[in-house]
Amino acid sequence: MRRLLPAVLCAVLALGLPAGARAASVTAPPGRTTVRPASTTVRTVPEAPIQVAVSSLPMPGRSLSSQRALAIGSAVAKVRDARRGHPGSYGAVYTKGPLRWQVSFFSRGPRPGGGGGRELAQVTIADRTGRVLEAWSGFQVAWTMARGYKGAFGEHVNALYIWIPLCLLFMVPFFDFRRPLSLLHLDLLMLLSFSVSLAFFNHANIWASVPLVYPPLLYLLVRMLWLLRRRAAGAPPGRPLRLLIPAPWLAVAVVFLIGFRVGLNVTDSNVIDVGYAGVIGAQRIAADRPLYGGFPADNEHGDTYGPFNYEAYIPFQQVFGWSGRWDDLPAAHGAAIFFDLLAVGLLFLLGRRMRGPTLGIAFAYAWVSYPFTLFALESNANDTLVAVTILAALLAASYGSGLARFARGGFAALAALTKLAPLALAPILATDGLRGMPPRSRAGSLALFAAGFLVLGGLAMIPALRHDTLHTVYERTLVYQGNRDSPFSVWGLYGWHGAELAAELFAGGLALVLAVIPRRGDLVGLAAGCAAIMIAVQISMEHWFYLYIPWFFALAIVALLGHFSPQTAPAADAASEPARSTPRAAALST
């Protein structure tokens, strides 16, 4: 989104919003003497590469000499391909712990902005056997998350014996055997189809995983826009949502799945860089230190998010503490579990507001059975917090009071101060419900929304602005994100930056158009509109990842399940019912 950065910056500075939409990652391409991965998202083994001189004699305790390691690395086909076209490229040898070697190959000449040549390829070699353990080139040198390391995100949640049963559990309650070709079945399958892309990602096949993301995104965008249609006056009601499993049993399943998710988080999950960043930021705010700049070297750019992201972690950092290292980070686990439970509760309340507890249970069940919400939970990421703030704004929109309008604006600000992308929802959230109001009431409603946005947004900005200037916040968030290339989109992978600009303009235009055009006026319409905007924004991102799916998933579920007509009670036989009623039944019916 580099081309729209000036426009975005003007809007953000006008509102005081410095949040970020992309995942933070540790970067710094290597110079001639040190090697650090450009994108580390998970805690790494403390085996930092140490450069050694090239020698034909083995080092003490080593089987291979550095010269032999260099020769093995140079012979790898992937290395030869990477060095072709780079005359003068050279290799450097590093020890990596007591049992491995790392050989890195660099282009000749300085990098733009200083430093050594660009790292072209990287090989890891077993010292005892001389076997090549890993060989990487291209963007997989810098982006370690593109290497398909087992369990790097969510540990065993990626295992087929967990993932496939979750997919089945997600589908079964909503399957209607009387209508096997129901469009809802296709909707749910498209939500699950991100799994195909994830499978390729987990096997380091980024060239397949990235393009496979876009068919479901585009389908869901079109589907959400379709659900925005207003029902014609006098049109017959649609069919009701039929649950294959009765609501009470579905509620039991929700409780069971919550327990499963929490247990899996506590016993088998990892904390990636974004969760680690939340704990670091919380500690810095609690200690009254500058929030932006000065993050630890193993999460140097963890300060790329808005201040509310870090403030949300403060209670958990205060309760569980932080050792100062990237360890198990119980505070990040506690925060992730709490955000997940909040999402479940908000979805239940939304369904209950719309149509009673049965729909609320269906919404909650969809969340706890959907594998990608568990993927976010088991990675202990901050992305569920984005979903929570958006759902809170949606719930506030279900009430008509002035306080609710103020709260809606406040939650919209907090969403944008977590990550920048939800800022695109501000127009539709601000204008929802205005149609049919007299002009004076419209102005008052917009004023209340704006007041909530500015008041809660301003309060959330206080910890950042106590020590940092807006320029510092801008440099650490928008400038860093705007200048970072990523292979995790078709725009970055193929260099389609002209098309990327078009996608960005479309997303921005859609956010404005949906705020003013006539559309379905209930919560289903608002959820579908918000989902469409979030999906369009994600399509335009240069850095997209599976952790972002919860941003729009809850909104999509509200729209997909909520648009069905309510169940209707069987019609009574007016002529004979009074005669057949017992005195007790008649009394209960009055």
Image (spheres, helix red, strand yellow):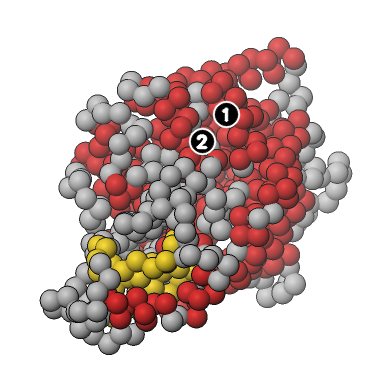
> Looking at the figure, which quarter contains the N terminus?
top right
Query: What is the crowding at mark 2: few (fewer than 14 residues within 10 Å), some, or many (at least 20)?
Result: many
Most distant residue in the bottom direction: 129
Q: In the visual, does 323 lie left or right of 34?
A: left
Q: Quarter-wise, where is residue 317 in the image?
A: top left
**Image location (x, y in percent) of residue 417:** 47, 33
**Mark number, residue 478:** 2
Residue name at image x 36 percent, y 80 percent:
71
**Mark number, residue 190:** none
The residue under label 1 is which amino acid type? Leu
Q: Classify 343 as above or below 90.
A: above
Q: In the visual, does 193 lie left or right of 294?
A: right
Marks 1 and 2 close (CB-CB < 8 Å) = yes
**Image location (x, y in percent) of residue 52:** 24, 66
Q: Which residue is mark 1?
A: 9
**In front: 540, or 297?**
297
Query: What is the crowding at mark 1: few (fewer than 14 residues within 10 Å), some, or many (at least 20)?
Result: some
Query: Which of disc 2 and disc 1 is earlier in sequence?
Result: 1
